[in-house]
Amino acid sequence: MFSRNDFSIWSILRKCIGMELSKITMPVIFNEPLSFLQRLTEYMEHTYLIHKASSLSDPVERMQCVAAFAVSAVASQWERTGKPFNPLLGETYELVRDDLGFRLISEQVSHHPPISAFHAEGLNNDFIFHGSIYPKLKFWGKSVEAEPKGTITLELLDHNEAYTWTNPTCCVHNIIVGKLWIEQYGNVEIINHKTGDKCV
C-alpha cells in the first residue's frame, strides 16, 4: 500500500506557489476516500441544534442554536488533512437520516469553477437548509488555504425565519515537512433576515 511518504509533494507543488489548486493534478494518496458531496453531509451531524432552535420561542435563543449549528460544521475537520475527491459535473449524493430527522441531496453544478450545491430538509417540515460552495484552494509554500466561497441559508419554517452565513477559511499547515495541522479562521457573521439580529 502506498503512503504519503512515498511521494514528494514538494516536487509537485514547488511550481504552484500562489496558484489556484483546482487546476493541479495531485496523487490520489493525498485524498480521503470520499467525495466533496459526501463531505457536505457532515454539516448535518448536529441537526439536533436546528430542531432545538425550531422549538424555541425566543429569537435570541434561536440565534444561539443556529450559531452553534453553523460553527459545528467545522468540528469534524480539526484532524482531517486529506482532500476529498472532486465530484464529476452532474454527480449527486443523497442521504436520508430518519434517526436525525432530515434528508439531503447535493450535486456538482459546475466543474470550472468547482461549485457544489446542497438542499436538506427536516422530515417534520420544520426546516430547510441549502446553499452552494466553491472551495477556492491556494498553495502558500508551507500551507494550503481553502476559502469556501458561497452563502449558506437555514430556514426555520415554523418561525418564518431565514438565517444566512459564510464559512470560515481553513488552512492546512506543514504540508511539506512536519506534522500536519489545521487552522480555521475568519469571521462567520450569521444574519436573521426576519429580525435583523446578527451574530459574529
Image: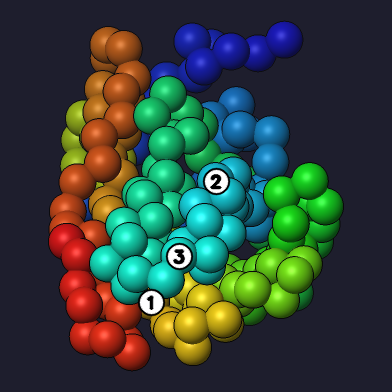
Label 3 or label 2, whichever lies nearer to me, is 3
Q: How many marks?
A: 3
Near mark 3 (Cα within 10 A), the count class, few <14, some 14-19 or many ≥20, is: some
Find the distance from the CA under tag 1 to the CA under tag 2.
Answer: 17 Å
**Residue 192 in sight:** yes
Quadrant of the drawing holding the C terminus: bottom left
Pointer 3 with pointer 2, Cβ within 8 A: no
Q: Secondary structure at mark 1?
A: strand
Residue 6, x across and y down, in percent: 53, 12
Relative height, residue 163 to residue 178 (above, below)? below
Q: Earlier in the sequence, mark 3 or mark 2?
A: 2
Q: Give the camera-side residue of 51 and 36.
A: 51
Q: Earlier in the sequence, mark 3 or mark 1?
A: 3
Residue 81 tag number:
none
**What amino acid is found at the position of numbered circle 2 in the picture?**
His
Residue 122, x across and y down, in percent: 69, 68
**What amino acid is found at the position of numbered circle 1 in the picture?**
Tyr
| Occupied quadrant, residue 27 | top right
Find the distance from the CA under tag 3 to the CA under tag 1.
Answer: 15 Å
Q: Secondary structure at mark 3?
A: loop
**What amino acid is found at the position of numbered circle 3 in the picture?**
Leu
The residue singled out by tag 2 in the image is 46
What colour scheme does the image use?
rainbow
Q: Is residue 108 left or right of residue 61?
A: right
Who's the residue at 58% across and 13% down the image? 3
Residue 56 tag number:
3
